[in-house]
Amino acid sequence: MKKILLGFVGLLFSSGAFAQKDSLAFDENNKYIYYKTVDQPGFVADSLYSRGLYFLTKAYPKKVLKLAKADKDGNALTGTGIFLVNKKGLMGNSEGGELSYTLKVEVKDGKYRYWLTDFVYQPYQRNRYGNVEHMHGKDVALEKASEKLSKVDFNACLNQVLSNSKHVGDNLKAYMLKTSSLEKPAEVKKVKRVSTKEW
């Protein structure tokens, strides 16, 4: 029985250590950031750039994630997105608000990096009809959300930020491996010339 109990405790600690491998961090501006670098040997920067652009324009509906800026050098992309955040309640989870973020992707030959940052939480409230709506003027940066939210809701929010950031990163990795790219423009059919001078 002791061996089973010790094995179970060891499993709990090892899964906890594994979960800590993928986490949010603070950047040089003291903002939460989810940062990853991915090696992709054999790929040139142009190919990775076009795949990243394809991801930002096609992977999600425009209201969830959209392309904000592509630089002229062809090595960096910026997008903005949102995801819903649930809050803990007595009877279960309910929609607590939405969290906006900025996604940045930079490419080089054989590798790319991406990060999600600039997280801003916008809480929801129920209106007099029982529908959920934004609480205007109550936006708060995730770094300061611990002051505005309860400890349970803040921890749940951080966990959801991490899981959603990981999900966005996994989707980006899948798109970076796809061979398809942006659609090529349709070929213009040659039009027969007609002279109106002669008839």
Image (cartoon, grey):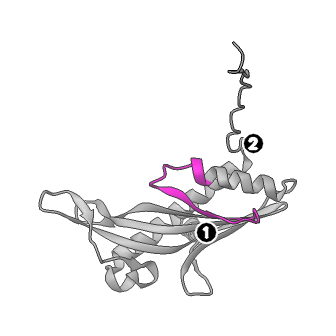
SS for dot 2: loop
**Image quadrant in which the C terminus is located:** top right
Q: Hey, which quadrant is residue 67 in on the image?
A: bottom right
In the rendered view, does 8 fall on the left or right side of 191? left
Residue 159 position, x and y percent, is 46, 68
SS for dot 1: helix
Name the residue that disc number 1 marks: 14
Q: Is residue 74 magenta?
A: yes
Residue 187 position, x and y percent, is 72, 31
**Please, what is the three-letter code of the amino acid marked with disc 1?**
Ser
Q: Hey, which quadrant is residue 94 in on the image?
A: bottom left
**Please, what is the three-letter code of the amino acid marked with disc 2?**
Thr
Whichever of labels 1 and 2 marks the residue nearer the N terminus, that label is 1
Q: Is residue 77 magenta?
A: no
Residue 198 position, x and y percent, is 72, 16
Which label was assigned to residue 179? 2
Q: Nearer the viewer, residue 155 or 60?
A: 60
Residue numbers of the magenta segment: 56-76
Residue 120 position, x and y percent, is 43, 74
